[in-house]
């Protein structure tokens, strides 16, 4: 069967995006960007003094995945934890402005809102460059009381979603209990479950798809992926050990590798998709969130794994052209695919 996104099938998937609802569970944080112009060297220490030009706050981590889903017209709710510091209302307001629901986002006065502050500088003779990043975070697990609250809300609202995305950045929300109970609730309700985790992927048994990048996959299997043989070995090992329906390893300039488990009526195996944008990469910050957000939304809209990863690849090719954490839209997806040189080549592939 030939696969071609430039068909009524592609348009029908895009048309279905606004009718989907996704629950994102995980570690949300703020990406704060502070930009200034170099004024002089300090007299107090050998450091730059910047004249402040602007500050901006973007949703980061799991919140960026949620923002990508909302930007693509999907309905989305963010379940997680913030602090009670000044950054918390700023992040909530930014999510609300983007159309992300925060009724399942709880406040914990004992921990900060995870914030990554990137400070960039420029002069009249130079481009803007990041010079330092400051992280404010608590990587300890959330309390049992917060687990109870969060899981009660997830259980109450689970019937209203088409898919669940577990986004684990190791900042305390995705505890073993939250993972296990969310998976149990989603699987009992027949919901799609996607996973983006910087930790051990074997903690998510039964997920529809796991989406590690190559270094994350290598950390789990315990060896480097250096050639086709080691790639196939790693994919097969992750499928077996994580008990997942599929595993997507994102490989930067080498594209994506999708491994599907054998099921009745389906042979499974490996599908490789080339990177759609290798030469215009400006900033990869948040690209993984774009991939998993688009992928989850596409699956919720009825896409196959192969259809969903191609759409996610197109979305990633758009956001890496921009500075900082970014999102894309349905119109941009459509335009990017229409102008993609590889489109005809992919259309000829027998997936």
Image: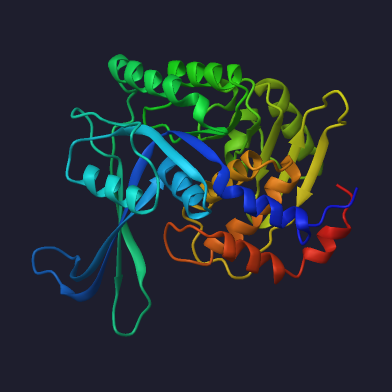
Q: Horizontally, is 27 left or right of 339 in the view?
A: left
Q: Horizontally, is 107 left or right of 256 in the view?
A: left
Out of 351 and 332, give the one closest to the viewer: 332
* Residue 278 shows in this picture: no
> Residue 112's spot in the image, x, y percent?
23, 36
Q: Quadrant of residue 104?
A: top left
Out of 214 and 290, give the one closest to the viewer: 290
> Residue 6's spot in the image, x, y percent?
77, 62
In the figure, 329 relative to 288: above or below?
Answer: below
Q: Residue at x 76, y 53 (%)?
A: 9
Q: How many tags in the picture?
A: 0
**Residue furthest left in the image:** 44
How did the renderer colour the structure? rainbow
Q: Quadrant of residue 178?
A: top left
Q: Residue at x 58, y 64 (%)?
A: 331
Q: Residue at x 59, y 41 (%)?
A: 296
Q: Residue at x 30, y 40 (%)?
A: 114
* Residue 245 shows in this picture: yes
Out of 311 and 50, give the one closest to the viewer: 311
Q: Horizontally, is 89 left or right of 72 in the view?
A: left
In the figure, 111 relative to 33: above or below?
Answer: above
> Residue 116's spot in the image, x, y percent?
32, 48
> Residue 341's spot in the image, x, y percent?
75, 70
**Residue furthest bottom in the image:** 125
Out of 189 and 181, give the one closest to the viewer: 189
In the figure, 289 relative to 284: above or below?
Answer: above
């Amino acid at each position: 069967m030939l696969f071609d996104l430039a068909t009524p099938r592609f348009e029908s998937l895009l048309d279905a995006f606004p009718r989907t609802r996704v629950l994102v569970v995980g570690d949300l944080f703020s990406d704060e960007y502070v930009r200034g112009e170099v004024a002089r060297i300090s007299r107090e220490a050998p450091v730059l003094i910047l004249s402040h030009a602007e500050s901006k706050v973007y949703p980061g981590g799991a919140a960026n995945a949620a923002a990508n889903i909302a930007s693509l017209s999907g309905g989305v709710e963010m379940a997680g934890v913030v602090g009670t510091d000044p950054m918390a209302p700023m992040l909530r307001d930014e999510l609300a402005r983007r159309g992300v629901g925060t009724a399942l986002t709880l406040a914990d006065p004992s921990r900060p809102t995870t914030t990554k502050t990137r400070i960039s500088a420029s002069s009249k003779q130079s481009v803007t460059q990041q010079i330092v990043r400051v992280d404010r975070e608590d990587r300890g697990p959330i309390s049992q009381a917060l687990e109870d609250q969060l899981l009660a809300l997830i259980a109450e609202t689970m019937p209203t979603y088409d898919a669940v995305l577990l986004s684990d950045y190791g900042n305390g929300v995705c505890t073993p209990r939250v993972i296990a109970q969310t998976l149990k609730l989603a699987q009992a309700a027949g919901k799609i479950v996607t996973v983006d985790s910087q930790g051990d992927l074997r903690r998510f048994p039964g997920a529809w798809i796991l989406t590690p990048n190559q270094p994350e996959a290598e950390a789990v299997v315990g060896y480097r992926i250096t050639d086709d043989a080691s790639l196939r070995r790693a994919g097969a090992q992750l499928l077996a050990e994580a008990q997942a329906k599929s595993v997507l390893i994102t490989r930067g300039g080498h594209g994506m590798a999708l491994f599907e488990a054998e099921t009745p009526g389906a042979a499974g195996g490996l599908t490789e998709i080339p990177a759609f944008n290798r030469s215009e990469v400006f900033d990869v910050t948040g690209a993984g969130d774009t991939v998993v957000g688009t992928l989850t939304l596409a699956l919720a809209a009825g896409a196959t794994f192969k259809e969903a990863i191609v759409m996610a690849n197109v979305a990633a090719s758009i956001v890496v052209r921009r500075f900082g954490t970014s999102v894309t839209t349905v119109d941009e997806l459509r335009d990017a695919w229409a102008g993609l040189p590889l489109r005809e080549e992919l259309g000829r592939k027998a997936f």
